[in-house]
Image: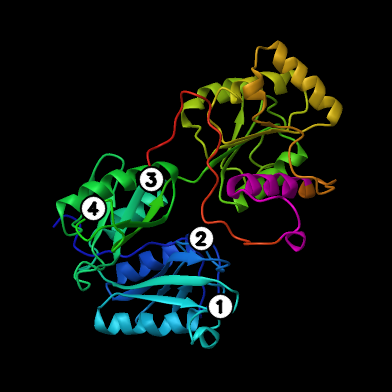
Amino acid sequence: MPGGAHSLVVWATGCGSRPGTGCRVRDIREAVAGLYASGERFAVATVIDTFKSAPRPAGAAMAVSASGEVFGSLSGGCVEGAVYEEALEAIRTGVPVRRTYGVADEDAFSVGLTCGGTLHVFVEPVDRDRYPSLGPVLGAIEEHRPVAVATVVSDPRGGGRTGMRRTVWPGHAEGDVGGDRLTDALDDDVRGMLAQGSTGLLRYGADGQRRGDELEVFVQAFAPPPRMLVFGAIDFAAAVARTGAFLGYRVTVCDARPVFATAKRFPAAEEVVVKWPHVYLDEVADLIDERTAVCVLTHDPKFDVPVLAAALRTRAGYIGAMGSRRTHDDRMARLREAGVSEEDLARLHSPIGLDLGARTPEETAVSIAAELVRDRWGGSGRALSETTGRIHRDAPVEPFVPAGFGHADR
């Protein structure tokens, strides 16, 4: 069959030399690529679902080589020891397994998951025969091309389909998941998830019916990293660019003044553009989506007003502008004079950031990052010690999108 019958669920975490040691997102992909190129069998364990205050989100992963070397982390140290043994067993037997770890289990304390959450983990052996199309998937991720992998992780028919997968690209899909009905449903649902860059479990009836939950498929969507557009080549912009890159954004810094807009001043930015901000924004408008963050730090109406008016015509999920209360009032008046509607003005975060009492560029960047995270996940912005209830939320908040843009079907 195209691409092979089996797959692994792919990676979104760091690496290390022993269970529980983490580092950069890129490193586990590099490690997996190296293991795959070596031709040896290895195992990948992936968090496929969580409940309550689980320490890591769905998609967190850990790879184990045949020699016992570990890359990545599932829980920051809570369950890695137990999963490590499962991974070695999967390498030995060639059989994928699903395991659940949580405080409700009698072994919860022995595996270390005492934080009040539950992790559902899928452990799968990987080699070239089992996953011949892994190379193209890794290549697409590295080149920022969208791709999603859908893996059957629970099969009511005795496990015969467990580990089978389908790889979905924007224009085509390949791989057998054991039935046309399930294939058709998956292609529809996975493309919607790929458009949003979301990862999670899909549940179907035993034959792929949309009514039912006996069969579970884990989908990991690898969309290009979200974009952050920073306007104004000032010292605050350098701090915001560093923080944005740390959060996983592809950062662009833009300013009309070539003496300030230099790559040397903004090493964390993927690109530095010398153009009038509103001109550049109009040029890249088609690349802006609901995951894009626009941060206007120019603090000058001749730059602010045109670029904000242009930004508010896009579907950017976050648009913020720096300045004092007086600057904000003046800016809003100028935007109204420019014909920006009240509905669009309601999307503007101004003054930008959360009220942390920030003073330095670095503190201000943290304030802006905190507002971005709050808006993405629907947090309150308050100290956790002052709140009750669940700490982690299951899914990002749907961003506000102007009428006419719409959302991908889910």
Q: Position of residue 147 (x, y in %)?
A: 34, 48
Question: Is tag 1's residue or tag 3's residue first in the polypeptide sequence?
Answer: 1
- In three-dimensional space, the C-alpha distance between marks 4 and 2, rounded to whole angstroms, equals 35 Å
- Judged by depth in the image, the label closer to the viewer, 4 or 2, is 4
Q: Please rate how many residues cluster around mark 2, counting C-alpha atoms within 10 Å: few if below 14, some from 14 to 19, many from 20.
A: some
On whether residue 376 falls in the magenta region, the answer is yes
Question: Is tag 4's residue or tag 3's residue first in the polypeptide sequence?
Answer: 3
Are the residues at dot 4 and dot 2 in contact (C-beta closer than 8 Å)?
Answer: no
- In three-dimensional space, the C-alpha distance between marks 1 and 3, rounded to whole angstroms, equals 30 Å
Describe the element under mark 4 as helix, strand or loop.
loop
- What residue does disc 4 label? 209
Q: Quadrant of the N terminus?
A: bottom left
Q: Which residue: 19% across, 70% down? A: 160
Question: At label 4, which amino acid type do we have?
Answer: Gln
- Which residues make up the magenta segment? 364-387
Question: At label 3, which amino acid type do we have?
Answer: Leu
Describe the element under mark 1 as helix, strand or loop.
loop
- What residue does disc 2 label? 25
Q: Residue furthest left?
A: 1
Describe the element under mark 2 as helix, strand or loop.
helix
Q: Is residue 388 visible?
A: yes
- In three-dimensional space, the C-alpha distance between marks 4 and 3, rounded to whole angstroms, equals 21 Å
Q: Please rate how many residues cluster around mark 1, counting C-alpha atoms within 10 Å: few if below 14, some from 14 to 19, many from 20.
A: some
Residue 194 image label: 3
Describe the element under mark 3 as helix, strand or loop.
helix
Q: In the drawing, does residue 375 fall left or right of residue 87?
A: right
Question: Is tag 4's residue or tag 2's residue first in the polypeptide sequence?
Answer: 2
Q: Please rate how many residues cluster around mark 3, counting C-alpha atoms within 10 Å: few if below 14, some from 14 to 19, many from 20.
A: many
Are the residues at dot 1 and dot 4 in contact (C-beta closer than 8 Å)?
Answer: no
Question: At label 2, which amino acid type do we have?
Answer: Val
Depicted 70 relative to depicted 373: above or below: below
